[in-house]
Image: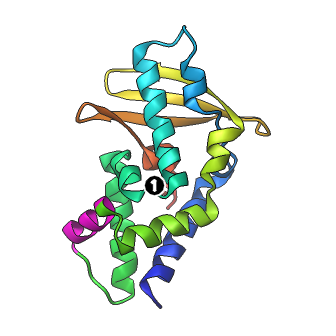
């Protein structure tokens, strides 16, 4: 099997584990909500960071997307890709994959193209309502209510290196609890 196929399978399985909460998300652009005078500067910063990740997905700007993710999410992605590649008889160091994902290289393209095959960021950017959850010193929550969903999703962001980063793994990482 080729490398792109293996990466596709990993992403497809991860997307299935995300469940309907991730697939059903749709958001109104954060910028539209951030024009509300009741939002604090911290809330605006969190909303802008979350929105920028989904916009980077849509634009297929994989280096910007990678930069907008938490270290925990990045490490989880790298570990999954390394494991799949090893099963396929190819070995990459963490450093090689880190550089590839940071630059939008072939492994990153294969991973994110497969991810976007099952997750449409337009859904996230158009048909849901955003509201701010709690903002702590280094952790924030954005509550996302899709127009056809009964329950909201809560997107977790963490402040790392002075910038808010979106935690895909922290938000949708249910696979950690699956035996």
Q: Residue at x 24, y 64 (%)?
A: 99
Quick check: can you spot residue 21?
A: no
Residue under numbered circle 1: 176
**Residue 108, percent across and down?**
39, 67
Tag 1: Cα neighbours inside 10 Å, few (<14), some, or many (≥20)?
few
Total labels drawn: 1
Judge whether 78 appears above or below 56 on screen: below
List the single residue furthest toward the top.
38
The residue at 26%/63% (across/down) is 98
**Residue at the image position 58 percent from the left and 29 percent from the top:** 143
- Is 99 contained in the magenta span? yes
Q: Nearer the viewer, residue 64 or 77?
A: 64
Q: Is residue 135 above or below residue 58?
A: above
Would residue 68 appear left or right of 175 to someone viewing this image?
left
Front residue of 134/112: it is: 112
The answer to whether residue 129 of the structure is visible from this angle is yes
Q: Position of residue 148 (x, y in %)?
A: 80, 39
- Is 152 on the left-hand or right-hand side of 116? right
Prevailing secondary structure of the magenta residues: helix
Q: How is the image coloured?
A: rainbow
Instruction: Provide the secondary structure element on which disc 1 rests.
Output: helix
Single out the residue that lies furthest toward the right: 148
Membership of 38 in magenta stretch: no
Q: Which residues are magenta?
A: 93-102
Eyeballing the image, is 163 above or below 26?
above
Camera-nearest residue between 35 and 53 = 35
Q: Residue at x 35, y 56 (%)?
A: 63
Where is residue 50? Give x, y as percent: 48, 37
């Amino acid at each position: 099997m080729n490398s792109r196929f293996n990466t596709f399978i990993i992403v497809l399985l991860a997307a299935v584990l995300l469940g309907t909460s991730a697939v059903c998300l749709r958001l109104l652009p954060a910028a539209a909500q951030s024009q509300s005078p009741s939002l604090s500067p911290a809330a605006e910063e969190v909303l802008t960071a979350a929105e920028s990740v989904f916009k980077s997905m849509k634009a297929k700007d994989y280096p910007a997307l990678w930069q907008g993710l938490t270290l925990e999410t990045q490490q989880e992605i790298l570990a999954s890709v390394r494991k799949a590649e090893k099963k396929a008889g190819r070995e990459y160091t963490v450093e090689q994959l880190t550089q590839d994902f940071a630059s939008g290289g072939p492994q990153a393209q294969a991973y994110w193209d497969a991810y976007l095959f099952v997750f449409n960021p337009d859904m996230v950017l158009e048909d849901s309502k955003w509201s701010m959850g709690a903002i702590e010193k280094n952790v924030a929550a954005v509550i996302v209510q899709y127009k056809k969903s009964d329950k909201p999703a809560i997107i977790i962001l963490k402040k790392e290196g002075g910038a808010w980063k979106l935690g895909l793994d922290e938000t949708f990482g249910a696979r950690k609890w699956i035996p």
